[in-house]
Amino acid sequence: MKCLLRPVLGALLAMAAGLPAHAESITFMTDFGFNGRHAYYYVALDRGYYRQAGLDVSFLRGIGSADVIRKVASGAVQMGFADAGSLVLARANDGIPVRMLAVVYAAPPHAVYATADGSIRKPQDLAGHRIADSAGSANTLLFGAYAKAAGFDPTKVTWQVAESSSLPTLLATGRAEAVGQFTVGEPLLAATIAPKKLVRLAYRDVGLNYYGNGIVASEDLIARAPDMLRRFVAATLHGMADAFADPGMAGETIARYQKQITPQIAAAETVQVRDLAMQEGQKLGAIVPARMTATVKVIAEAYKLNRTAAPEEMWAAGFVP
C-alpha cells in the first residue's frame, strides 16, 4: 500500500507546492559552447522557472547557428539558439522548416576584432588580411553584407577556420590577425589578450540593422506543442529579466553549472547581452515584423538565394507573453 501511495503523495506534494507533477523533458542547444552570454538560461534553471512551467530542461553545446537550425529541424533537439541571418539562408536555400519564437539579440551582435598593435583600424583595413572564425559562424555568413555596407571587397579577405573556443588565444598570440566574434564575447576576448587592447569592428557600426540570435523551433513542434514552447519562452524571459537586473548574480549562477566560466566575465557578457536585447520601445523577446523584414532584406541583398525569402516564414507569433 505504501508503494502504491508514493506516486500519489508525490503528485499531491507537487500540487501543494504549485509545481507540475510531471515535467516534459526538453533539450536546448546553444549557438556556440557554454559561455557567460548564456547565463540567463541558467538563472531560469537555477531559480526553478522551467520546473514551475512543467519543464525538465537540459542544455547541449552548439557548434554554430547553421548546425543548430539543422539539429532543431531534424528533431535531434527540441529548441535552440540561432542567428536570424542563418535562419533566412537555411529556409531560402535549403527549405529547412524552422522559425524564430523570440528574439534575444534585437540588434546586430556580429563583429570582427583585431588588436590595437596591428594594422587593422577600420573595416577597409581587413582587405588582404586573415580572419579566424569557426565553421558555420554567423559572422562569416553575414560578412558579405558587412563588406558591402563598409565599401570593400569581401573576396580580398581570407578566412581561417578554427574552433570557437580557441579564437581568443589565436588573437592574443598573433596566430590570427583578426577574429570573428559576437560583441557579447568581448569581455572574455579583452581579458585573454590583456594587456593588449582590442579594436572592435561591429557590423552595426556601418549602418546594418537586423536581428541577431533568438530562440528557434521546428514548424512540426510549433504545430504539435505550442503550449510547451510558450512556457519555455516565458520561463526563459523571466530568467533573462532577473539576469539583466543583477548581472553579478547571473555570472555566479552559470559559473556554478559551468566550472570553466569566470563569474566576472559572465557578468560582463550578460551586460553586453542586455545592451542587445533591451531596445527602446520594444518588448523583451518580441519580434517586430518590420525588423524581420529588414533582416531578410540584408541577407537577400548580400547573397544569392534559391528562392524569395518571405519575412513571415522566419518567425512565429504568439510565443512571447
Image: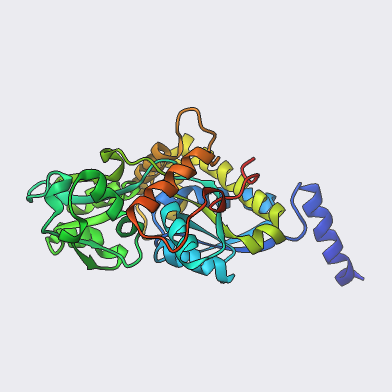
Name the residue at the front extreme.
307
Q: Which residue appears at 54% of the width and 65% of the height?
A: 72
- Quadrant of the image containing the N terminus: bottom right
Q: Which residue appears at 51% of the width and 69% of the height?
A: 71
* Left or right position of 145 against 289: left
Residue 21 locus on image (x, y percent): 77, 58
- Quadrant of the image containing the C terminus: top right
Q: Which residue appears at 44% of the width and 67% of the height?
A: 67
Q: Which residue appears at 45% of the width and 39% of the height?
A: 277
The colour scheme of the drawn protein is: rainbow
Viewer-nearest residue: 215 or 125: 125
* Left or right position of 273 against 238: left
Residue 239 locus on image (x, y percent): 55, 44
* Left or right position of 75 against 149: right
Vertical side of 25 occupied by 280: above or below: above
Residue 106 locus on image (x, y percent): 44, 41
Vertical side of 294 occupied by 62: above or below: below
Viewer-nearest residue: 300 or 229: 300
